[in-house]
Amino acid sequence: MKIIFYSPTSDAELWLHDLVHAMPDAEVREWQPGDHAAADYAIVWRPPHEMLAGRDTLRAVFNLGAGVDAILAIEAREPGTLPRNVPLVRLEDSGMAPQMAEYAMHAVLRYLRRFDEYALLQNERNWEMLEPHPRETFTVGVLGLGLLGTHVAERVATLGVPVRGYSRNARSIEGVTTFAGQAQFDAFLDGVKVLINLLPYTPDTHDVLNASVFAKLAHGAYVVNLARGRHLVEEDLLAALDSGQIAGAMLDVFREEPLDREHPFWRHPRIAITPHSAALTLRAESIEQIGRKIHALENGETIGGIVDLTRGY
């Protein structure tokens, strides 16, 4: 069995080293320009067109991430990058769900207990006690109920606040009020106090966090974006913060990363920034998952995580 690997990241050598040791029965090689030799599987992050184009005999392409928008963007720019009729497989969790839930719960508690406002008061050396938000009306809405979104919704519900979840197709989650489809989108948004975005990025979800959506939330709502920077219309968020419709935002992802040092988000007192670190891809867990799925495919078994290219996830 032959496996080709490519990643432009600084830890690519570590990934290659661990892949080789985790799959001793396979021939694992790092792809280099000009390498057109046979391969059964490809494990990639942001691969160049030349690496995958025409490799129609691959059994699967494994993407080193839960989101596949980066590789689909390469395919859109250079059609034919993804081999025909070869399944594209995304990571499923790989240790990311607990990290994402921790981040989301921190954000909810930050706003519920008004720690963000206490930080502003500290900067002013102002000793003032604030009443916490009423828990029973502090509705949290989780936008996107995939594996990560479902786990986040379930964990946030343990805080004792009302939790809603929205997905394209109907879902049922214990302790969470769920909404589905465009017809129920406005009902999902109505009165939400904290909106947590965990949608996959597709053409349909581009700019989904916009002025129209902000206006439907509770006055003084909070926005937490953990999915993709291109979900957020930045100018609309700044305007909503200025008007008071949005009281604060916690952002982990941005349209351009790293975020430009002159970007207004850095200086805004109501915006908290983290550097796309809400849930890191854990190498050992990811390699174990990929190895397990390759073994299943070799035995003619079905696997999860196969991307529907028409939907983008």
Image (cartoon, rainbow, N blue to C red):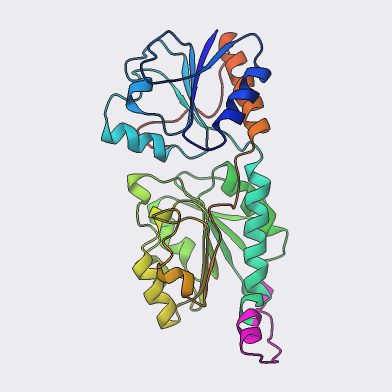
Residue 174 percent location from the top left of the image? 67, 50
User: Where is the N terminus found, in terms of image quarters?
Assistant: top right
- Relative to 207, residue 312 above or below: above
- Decide if residue 103 is on the left or right side of residue 198: right
- Relative to 42, residue 268 above or below: below
- Relative to 240, residue 162 above or below: above
Displayed quadrant of residue 38: top left
Displayed quadrant of residue 55: top left
Q: Residue at x 45, y 30 (%)?
A: 307
Q: Residue at x 73, y 58 (%)?
A: 158
Residue 97 percent location from the top left of the image? 64, 45
- Residue 70 shows up from this direction: yes
- 128 falls in the magenta region: yes
- Decide if residue 78 is on the left or right side of residue 273: left
The magenta segment is: 118-136
Residue 267 percent location from the top left of the image? 47, 74
Q: How many marks?
A: 0
- 277 falls in the magenta region: no
Q: Residue at x 65, y 70 (%)?
A: 110
